[in-house]
Image (tube, rainbow, N blue to C red):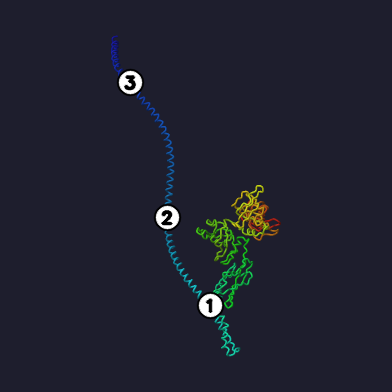
Amino acid sequence: MKKPVAILAILLAIAVAVAGLFGVQKSNVSADLNSITAERDSLQTQLNDATAKVTELEASVASLNAAAETAAADLAAAKAENETSVAKIAELEANVTSLTAAAETAAETAAADLAAAKAEAETGLAKIAELEASVASLNAAAETAAADLAAAKAENEASLTKIAELEAAAAAVTAVEVPAEEPAEVPAEEPAEEPAEVPAEVPAEKDTELAAARSYLRTMYKSATETTPVDYTVVGVINIGGEEYPIQWTADSETVKIIPGDDKMVTIDVDEKNPEEVQYVLTATLTGKTGQTAELTFKHKVPAAMILEGLSYEEIVAAAYTLEDGLALEDAQRLYGEIVKIDTPWSEEYKNITVTIQVGDLADQTIQCYRLSGEGCATLAVGDKITVEGIIKNYKGTIEFDKGCVLVGMGEIISQAAILDAAYALEDGAAMPAPTALEGEIVAIDTPWSEEYKNITVSIVCDGKAEQKIMCYRLTGEGAQDLAVGQTIAVAGTIKNYKGTIEFDKGCVMIPVGSVNDVRVAMGAYTLEEGLAQDKAKTLTGEIVTIDTAWSDEYKNITVTIVPGGMADYKVMCYRLTGEGAETLAVGDVITVNGIIKNYKGTIEFDKGCTIVK
């Protein structure tokens, strides 16, 4: 038992010791625990702060991650775009390289051209200098020639006078010698007395001046053209040595009139409209101071008048090509053709251009339009179809519109002058024998639109002829209610003179602008008596209103009826019509037909053989 007690004592002693030790340590541990607690609190605070910071950082990281993703996407897009840009840059670099090469080539070419131009300019300047020198030389030569010519004229007049004197002297000598040839008739002593009779021949000496005047007149007109299509003038007096010798002109044709002027000139008035050629002799009778006379004769002819009214463009061209060099058609003509050449480009300084046109198929008979002017001329080009008006002449073999010709407009514009002249020739109360059509600009609203009567009265001016305006009395038609000054319209009806006012009578109607010519053709056809036909082919555009006989594969033709310009009262049948596209024609189609129009048992029709133009 002692052993366990001992052990217990030992254990107790150890416990006491340990308790003592722990008592000391407890005191220390409490102090440490407080310190640890304070540190723990500090750390907790730091931990809380850190946790908040972490939370904040996590939010920032999340935001940065989102931004990073966006940036990654943008980067990817930028890379793709960059790759495209790189490719584009490469392409542009290639283009730049190509353009640079081209520019260098162009620069070299330009340099070469510039050098050539400089050389040409130098040559041109040298040529100009040469020409100026030539001009100066020619001017000097011209002055010398003028002086020589004046001297030659004076010498020529002196020579003519001398010749006339010698001729008179020779005549006088011959007269004196005649008695000597007949001695049997005269006593031997009379020849000595004969000189006393010679003074009776003295007036012959004064005839030398008359002979000189005659020779001078012959020189003036011996090269004059034989053909005289228009009036012309000649001198009424010749002056030789300060003396005037009057001239009496006569002609052996009643169609040629002699009209003396107050300026010592005489007008030879020929009949430009005679239907046949007239040959005549023009005689000049000069009177000397003594009353003696001398005569000269000149043969001339007046060509048959070219009656161009109503002719087609082709016929006018044909007439122009019969002109002799230097001659012209009497009146202004109007032609429609296509420009085939720009002879001289538009001049801003002179406001004109020279072009050549072809009328229809007349490629071998073109017409030059010399110094053509008018609105639209500045932009004319080959291929344009134009209407030109002016005087046509033969200038050294070139058939041309003379300077002063005007561009009427683009496309075909039919002259209305003949209709206007005929209208203004009507007596009061008279009317034109058949309806017609005109196109013009409204210059006045004489009576406004009437809703009750569905008409309006306006006045129009055609082709700019303000002095020949036409009133359209009680005009009807689609769009009439909206008409205003300045508008261009086309009107069909009967023209009359009503108390001095030239007007379309009531019942006149509006037709489409541009259809005037077609309506006129149809209206003209309706004046044909039964069984008669027009003598020349006509062209007419209209809308098909009926298929009278269907297309025949056997005979290759069709019969249709067309209406021009909406004028249902003037329909025209196209009998056995042929041409490209005829087999597919249908009601409503608009076609242009060419052929002879006739009145067949009351039906106005194109005769068989008519064809589609387009």
Which residue is under mark 2? 107
Q: Earlier in the sequence, mark 1 or mark 3?
A: 3
The type of residue carrying mark 2 is Ala
The type of residue carrying mark 3 is Asn
Task: Give me the disc on residue 562.
Answer: none
Q: Where is the N terminus found, in terms of image quarters?
A: top left
The type of residue carrying mark 1 is Thr
Describe the element under mark 2 as helix, strand or loop: helix
Which residue is under mark 3? 34
Note whether 451 is above or below 534 in the view shown. above
Image quarter for residue 180?
A: bottom right
Which residue is under mark 1? 161
> At 43% across and 34% down in the image, what residue appears?
66
Q: Position of residue 282 (x, y in %)?
A: 60, 72
Q: Is residue 144 visible?
A: yes
CA–CA distance in space, label 1 to label 3: 168 Å
Q: Is residue 582 visible?
A: no
Q: Earlier in the sequence, mark 2 or mark 1?
A: 2
Q: Position of residue 498 (x, y in %)?
A: 66, 56
Say which of 352 and 93 sits in front.
352
Q: Position of residue 161 (x, y in %)?
A: 53, 77
Q: Where is the C terminus found, in terms of image quarters?
A: bottom right
> At 66% across and 61% down in the image, what residue appears?
535
